[in-house]
Amino acid sequence: MSAIIELEGVRKTYRTGSMEFEALRGVDIRIDEGEYVAVIGPSGSGKSTLMNLLGCLDLPSEGRYVLAGEDTSRLDEAALAAIRNRRIGFVFQQFHLLPSMTAWRNVELPLIYAGVPRAERKERAVSALTRVGLGDRIDHRPGELSGGQQQRVAVARALVTEPALLLADEPTGNLDSRSTRDVLGLFDELHTSGRTIVLITHEPEVAARAQRNLVFDDGRITVDRPTAAVAPAGAS
Ligand code: ADP
Ligand code: MG
């Protein structure tokens, strides 16, 4: 197995005026391709800070982040933006869909930034929506969809670029229990098909669906353990 994520001695200090706060206090993590990892921990423990670093949305104050063999600290903003667009799919608690655009227009957005031609964009957007079970909702706007359906549109948008890594920060935080089951079922399928997933959650039932749990407390990993979840066929 090759590593997709390697963090070494990562620290993150936020500075607000003269105040400093160390949100990550020395984090070492290795995640291999194809793993399904849940990061769990109380509010304020540093989970979203970690997600922002993993997603190249922010940089560590100290330490190294190697993503798919590339040391991200050596990359400029344009290179980081390209990595975010091509290699990483993001899913957030608040969906972040554009309300005036139909489902397929929302899903095609990352392909516009990636410079994919128009006809291919629609085809790929529709195929991603079909994959998440929304092939019959492509022309609906977010306001015409349930919360669970909106989150599935967001998952389709995250997948449309075929990213190596899917990062999800509290993706079920705004969903009812049925929609939570739908979205987690989708993550199970993505994992089985080989996608690397890092899911952040404060809900133990959600974390139990992953293969491995990293428990955060006060900016540090306190526990790194496999879950009882069944490994997909082919995993050892
Ligand atoms: P979690 O996602 O686990 O709830 P966060 O990573 O959002 O935790 O936050 C960890 C700590 O860092 C919290 O104490 C939070 O207040 C602080 N923090 C987060 N973002 C910022 C920021 N941009 N500026 C200053 N402090 C921040
Ligand atoms: Mg958070």
Image: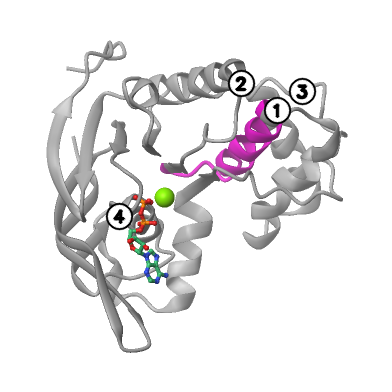
Cβ of mark 2 under 8 A from ligand 2: no
**Residue 10 versus residue 123 in the image, above or below:** below
> Is residue 210 shown left or right of residue 216?
right
Question: Which of 127/14 is in front?
Answer: 14
Circles 4, 1 touching at the beta carbon (< 8 Å):
no
Return the x and y of residue 115 as percentages of the image width and height. Answer: 67, 61
Q: What residue is drawn where x is 17% and y is 45%?
A: 30
Residue beneath label 1, please?
149
Give the mark, 1 or 3, whose residue is nearer the N terminus. Answer: 3
Instruction: Give the distance between the C-alpha atoms of the residues marked 2 and 3, in whole angstroms.
Output: 17 Å
Between disc 2 and disc 3, the foreground one is 2
Question: Which of 169/23 is in front?
Answer: 23
Residue beneath label 3, please?
135
Instruction: Give the distance between the C-alpha atoms of the residues marked 2 and 1, in whole angstroms.
Output: 8 Å
Quadrant position of residue 67: bottom left
View extreme (bottom): residue: 18
**Residue 100 versus residue 183 in the image, above or below:** below
Residue beneath label 2, please?
179
Q: The residue tagged with tag 4: helix, strand or loop?
A: loop
Is residue 164 one of those drawn in magenta?
yes
Residue beneath label 4, please?
46
**Residue 33 versus residue 27 in the image, above or below:** above
Give the mark, 2 or 1, whose residue is nearer the N terminus. Answer: 1
Three-letter residue code for mark 3: Gly
Q: The residue tagged with tag 1: helix, strand or loop?
A: helix
Span highlighted in magenta in the image? 148-165
Three-letter residue code for mark 2: Ser
Three-letter residue code for mark 4: Gly
Between disc 1 and disc 3, the foreground one is 1
